[in-house]
Amino acid sequence: MKKKNDKPLEKPTIAQLEVELGREKYRHRFRRVLRSTIYALITVAAAAVLVATLWMPVLQISGNSMTPTLTEGEIVISLSGSSFNTGDIVAFYQDNKILVKRVVAGPGDWVDIDEDGRVFVNDEELDEPYLVEKALGKCDITLPYQVPESKIFVMGDHRSVSVDSRSSAMGCVAYDQVVGHLVLRVWPFEMLGSIR
């Protein structure tokens, strides 16, 4: 039954149908692009997390055992690896914490430190231009000391306060404890650059 005020349905024109079809195609394309963008972002985020966790861990420095080279609050990137040279700064696990120290000697090397804090490896004094002061520090190991196999002897750059391989409480660091060696400081921005 028809009401008085009912208007008959108007048939859309070809132009109106084409406009509506264009809108539907645009909505479909937009959804497809949005979906693929979200998938791409999720993939990139997952890859970034894997890289940051396994290959290039990002660390924040706490404490002052590496001053003046590294200070509290700085953010650094380390590079995973199993080859370390004297002078490299490494991050490693110790008592469920990640510590940062400098490699002084490798497996089989003999380390000796005199009262003035000069470090000798295999009877040769280390050139340590990164130090502001030399100190014997907290040393309770018997010197000269031979580094055990598969371990590295590490020391902080702030020698008078750093607890490191000179202390029997910490000792030498096993290769499987090492997270990686530090390669880049990323924060603060004004100090962005490689770490030496």
Image (cartoon, rainbow, N blue to C red):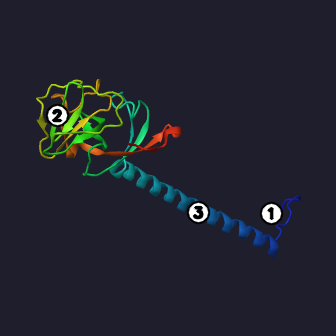
Query: Where residue 71 sits in the image (x, y, percent)?
Result: 41, 31
**Residue at x-position 59% and y-position 63%:** 33
Q: Where is mark 1, residue-wise?
A: 1
Tag 2 and tag 3, C-beta contact below 8 Å:
no
**Between 194 and 60, which is closer to the camera in this rendering?**
194
* Up-down relation of residue 35 to residue 67 (above or below): below
Residue kind at label 3, given as amino acid type: Val
Query: Where residue 122 sits in the image (x, y, percent)?
Result: 16, 42
Please tell me which of labels 2 and 3 falls first in the chain: 3
Frontmost of labels 2 and 3 is 2
Tag 1 and tag 2, C-beta contact below 8 Å:
no
Q: Where is mark 2, residue-wise?
A: 112
Between the C-alphas of marks 1 and 2, the distance is 108 Å
Residue kind at label 2, given as amino acid type: Asp
Q: Which mark is residue 33?
A: 3
Residue kind at label 1, given as amino acid type: Met
Frontmost of labels 1 and 2 is 2
